[in-house]
Amino acid sequence: MMSVKKVLAIVLAGGEGKRLMPLTADRAKPAVPFAGFRLVDFALSNLANSGYFKIVVLTQYKSHSLDRHISETWRMSTQLGNYVASVPAQQRRGKSWFLGSANAIYQSLNLIGDAEPDIVVVVGADHVYRMDFEQMVQSHIASGARATVAAVRQPLEMADQFGVIEIDGTPIDGAIGAHKISAFVEKPESTPGLMDAPDQFLASMGNYVFDADALVEALEQDALKENTKNDMGGDIIPYFVSRDEAYVYDFSTNDIPDATDRDRNYWRDVGTIDSYYDAHMDLISPMPIFNLYNRAWPIFTRNTTSPPAKFVRGEQNSVGTALDSIVAPGVVVSGGVVENSVLSNDVFVAAGARVQESVLMDRVSVGAGAVIRRAIIDKNVKIPAGATIGVDVELDRARGFTITESGLTVLSKGQFVSPPDEHERKLALEAAAELPEALAIAIDRNQLSEETAMKIVENQLSAITPVHAGSMSYDGEASIDG
């Protein structure tokens, strides 16, 4: 049943994303690329698929690329009164910028006044998931709540990492997934388990549904306080809890068409480099944990003019191959090997190069014989022939690359990578000589002889011999005399 209520959707997209540095050095967190999309595309796609076409996106931090992406990608039928509008901080209520997520909406109350909605849906712009918000709105209406918080089930030992929602356990008749909130606690040391799942708790997803008049009143009350953090989760939701007007919506009850058993109710907070990387790795298995190929609930993004991806032989007939990977339009793998990786638009991988367990963004160029391992490479980076990224942590650190606690190597947008010296070329050659995982599995299953596999590897190595003889140019393409 479709809601007869007027709904305005507000996307909170002003996040700085400090924990995603250096990916946020030049852009807002919601504008960070993800598997050929932008993070904001997931929130906007969910809203559009839910039937909500009046959407405002509140921006602030380094918002140029985000504003440009929204203006070029998210166009609704204005003739029908629909829109996706990017709205910057305007200092409408005092001479300060947004002081928090609640203050961002407070300073933009004119948007609610202009739209005159009955219901306001407020969502974050930095999570990867699918969700039908109409189901949450219907639950909100049926429960009689004034504020509803979407919650995802998480293991009990992770309670200190989330805003925790404690419930009274009594289901609400006619309101699927709804329970009254008894307490909202920010990152507690411990919390009680759920009645139907003692090893789990409900964590706030940062998505909310409000009666419009109740939200306006709460924001105005919050603005008068001196000890507020101006935060939706930290201040506004506790306000409604104290008034016995806050309910939770259990995300596990949300039903998406054509969802698989593996990706049903998938939700990932990609607020850190490691979680951002892990979310990419969730995409690439044969039965992915998060399925990008659900046509019944598509994720929309900007159309590309890039040609189809291409896998061709390179120098010495080396075979261009991608194994257990996602490659976007415009990718050319010319005699290189890509394994367990995600390659965005227009990436080039030259002969004998190896890309393993990595995320490469638009227009990254990988030179012949270069090796990339467990790395995130931002846009427009050129990896010289014979270079290594992620093979030697100390070498990466000495070159000014970012290294996470888990050992990921991260290069920022357009970051310079110096040509390799003899030591690094040797590292690259040794790494390139390793047997690809798929071939090792085939040998183990007697699907391929070890002799044949070694011939494949030797053929790849022969393609990069010129690299170690110094006859390759900087960008990895063969020179005239090579």
Image: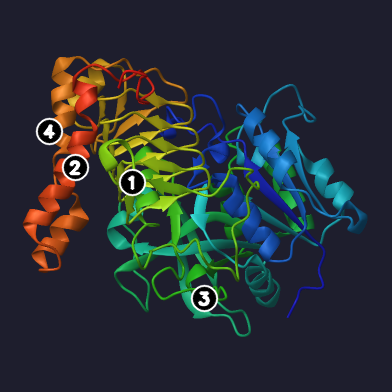
Q: Earlier in the sequence, mark 1 or mark 4?
A: 1
- Check the picture and name the quadrant holding the C terminus: top left
* Dot 1 or dot 2, earlier in sequence: 1
**Of the two numbered discs 1 and 4 in the rendering, the one whose residue sits closer to the viewer:** 1
The answer to whether any part of residue 380 appears in the image is yes
Mark 4–mark 2 Cα distance, whole angstroms, equals 15 Å
Q: Which residue was labeled with disc 4?
A: 430
Characterize the local packing of mark 3: few (<14), some (14-19) or many (20 or more) Cα atoms within 10 angstroms.
Answer: some
- Judging by the rendered image, the residue that carries numbered circle 3 is 253
N-term mark: 2 or 3: 3
Residue at (49, 54) in percent of width and height: 128
- Residue 101 image-quadrant placement: top right
Q: Residue 425 in the image: x percent, y percent?
A: 18, 22
Q: Secondary structure at mark 3?
A: helix
Q: Which mark is residue 459?
A: 2
- For marks 2 and 3, give the CA distance: 53 Å
